[in-house]
Image (cartoon, rainbow, N blue to C red):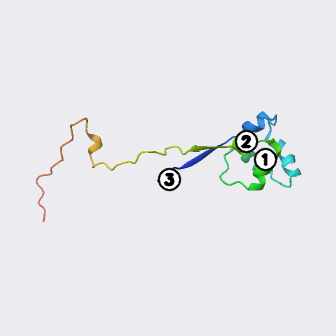
Amino acid sequence: MAAKLDYHWHLRKVMADRGLFSTTDLIPLLDKRGISLSSSQVYRLVVERPERLSLKILMALLDILNCTMDELIEPTAAAGAETATRTKKAVGAEAGVGDLRPKRARISGIERP
């Protein structure tokens, strides 16, 4: 089974390292590179982790911040990804303690056809 990949988005940290503390500081810098985004779009780009990102915007961010892709995007293993395979357990097996297992219930007094 292939490993599930995830990533961390470090745009806010890289911006702070370069002295850009306001998301609106990016708007004119992006505009100079032919990318016009609204203030809410830029805010979401900085604050949230983008699921889709155009390469033009990514290249403009790398140029503006004078950084590499490794500084902006950190690949990680997905949360909850397990390396070992899980095996199915029998119903009731998880309720036992050590070698002790619960006894199966028997219903009496009911006639079956």
Query: Would residue 19 be visible to someone looking at this image?
Result: yes
Tell me, yes or no, whether the two marked residues, 1 and 3, touch with CB atoms within 8 Å.
Answer: no
* 3 in relation to 14, above or below: below
Q: In this view, does 101 lie to the left or right of 70?
A: left
> What secondary structure is found at the residue carrying circle 2?
helix
Q: Residue 4 in the image: x percent, y percent?
A: 53, 50
Amino acid type indicated by mark 1: Leu
* Quarter in which the C terminus is drawn: bottom left
Left or right: where 62 falls relative to 32: left
Residue type, numbered disc 3: Ala
Q: What kind of element bears circle 1?
A: helix
Q: Residues within 10 Å of mark 2 (few under 14, many from 20)?
A: many
Residue occupied by mark 2: 11
Q: Name the residue under label 3.
A: 2
Task: Name which residue lies at 74% across and 55% down.
Answer: 55
Q: How far apart are marks 3 and 2 (CA)?
A: 28 Å
> Residues at badges 2 and 1 in contact (C-beta under 8 Å)?
yes
| Category of crowding for the residue at label 1, using alpha-carbon neighbours closer than 10 angstroms: few (below 14), some (14–19), many (at least 20) | many
Q: Distance between the residues labelled 1 and 3?
A: 31 Å
Q: Which residue is drawn at 40% across and 48% down?
A: 85
Based on the displayed image, in which of its 4 quarters is residue 74 positioned?
A: top right
Q: Nearer the viewer, residue 86 or 101?
A: 86
Circle nearer the N terminus (2, 1): 2
In this rendered view, identify the residue nearer to me: 69 or 106. 69
Q: What residue type is labelled 2?
A: Leu
Q: In the rendered structure, are the residues bearing label 3 and label 2 in contact, judged by CB atoms less than 8 Å apart?
A: no
On residue 61, the disc is: 1
Discs 1/3, front: 3
